[in-house]
Amino acid sequence: MLAIRFEATGGPEVLERVALPEPAPGPGEVLVRHTAIGVNFIDTYHRSGVYPVPLPAIPGLEAAGRVEAVGAGVTHLREGDRVVYFTASPGSYAAARAVPAHAVVRLPDDLPDEVAAAAWLKAATVEFLVERCARVTAGDTVVVTAAAGGVGLLLCQWLKAVGARTIAVASSAEKQALARGAGADEAIGYEGMAEAVRALTSGRGADVVIDGVGRATFEAALAALRRRGLLVSFGNASGKVGPVDFGILAARGSLFTTRPTLFDYYATAEDFAAGTARVLAMLAGGRLDVRIGHRWPLAEAAACHQALEARATTGSVLLLP
């Protein structure tokens, strides 16, 4: 089968097309034949070495497809089931994958494969960020950076659904318009971000900043917060924030900050069941309009990563086997 693999970390050029034997599911696993593979920025962290993984490695944490074979002990899935999954370890940039069955969810008939692959991990990320990490409630003012990306657009919609006021931050007028279309109340650029947020909040600042950019926006995000506000720094698109003097939190108004990861919020079977049920309810209820901005053939994964890191994409990105 076709797979994309890297044997050393580096830029998109380290991604190579390889032909590998098709896997067989072991006990507690199912073999999923992929129809659509979700691309996430964390895939570039694995490839570049920001988040080290054993080498050689196949990138990718999520995909949708059909169950082609069932391993021993699996009772809740059958051959032919349409499914979606995400996992903590990479390996989905391939035509098929043997996946732990506990990570696999059967899709409802009205949820297309491409939409599921485009939304699954991102929507689960949004669910934990909004509802269990920041605990956003109606009336809160929330700043979202990278608001026109796959996670950003879903954040704007989810925050609207819970009644928050959203200030989206994006790098161009086109991207800002996308964020407004997804439910953001205001949209601004990165230059003068903190000042713009304060102007929009009558000097008070935001209750929460949800930031996927990292180093380039860290200080502006803190400056945009109200006294005792919360910075949720969940991504490193511009690089890691690096060493931090905790005194800056006191100087900015006794601020709070956290650096959460998805898999600490989906760590147990109970977490997983509750979180994915909420995601399915939001998707099935029509509260999330999943925008698929780009599709690449699986064989062109390197070009996909190049565009992703150049901020040349909007919405969710798919690889198609």
Image (cartoon, grey):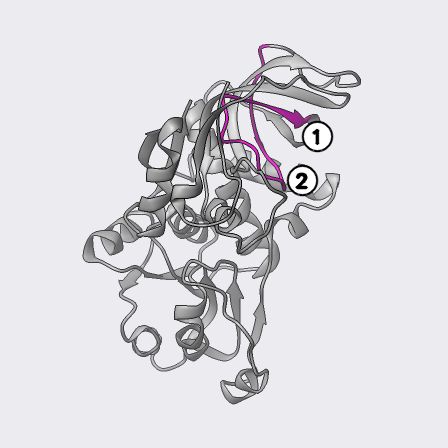
Q: What stretch of residues is rendered in magenta?
A: 80-100
Give the residue displayed 28% in from the left and 53% down from the top. Answer: 180
Alpha carbon distance from label 1 to label 2: 9 Å
The residue tagged 2 is 272
Identity of the amino acid at label 1?
His
Q: Residues within 10 Å of mark 2 (few under 14, many from 20)?
A: some
Is the C terminus in the top left, top right, bottom left or bottom right quadrant? top left
Q: Position of residue 101 (x, y in %)?
A: 69, 26
Q: Position of residue 94 (x, y in %)?
A: 50, 26
Question: Dots 1 and 2: beta carbons under 8 Å?
Answer: yes
Q: Do we see residue 140 in this rendering?
A: no
Q: Residue furthest top?
A: 79
The residue tagged 1 is 102
Helix, strand, or loop for circle 2? helix
Q: Residues within 10 Å of mark 1 (few under 14, many from 20)?
A: some
Front residue of 245/149: it is 245
Q: Do we see residue 28 in this rendering?
A: yes
Identity of the amino acid at label 2?
Phe
Single out the mark in the foreground, 1 or 2.
1
Give the residue displayed 45% in from the left and 65% down from the top. Answer: 214
Give the residue displayed 46% in from the left and 35% down from the top. Answer: 38
Using residue 207 as the reference point, say whether residue 315 is left or right of it. Answer: left
Q: Is residue 197 above or below residue 64?
A: below
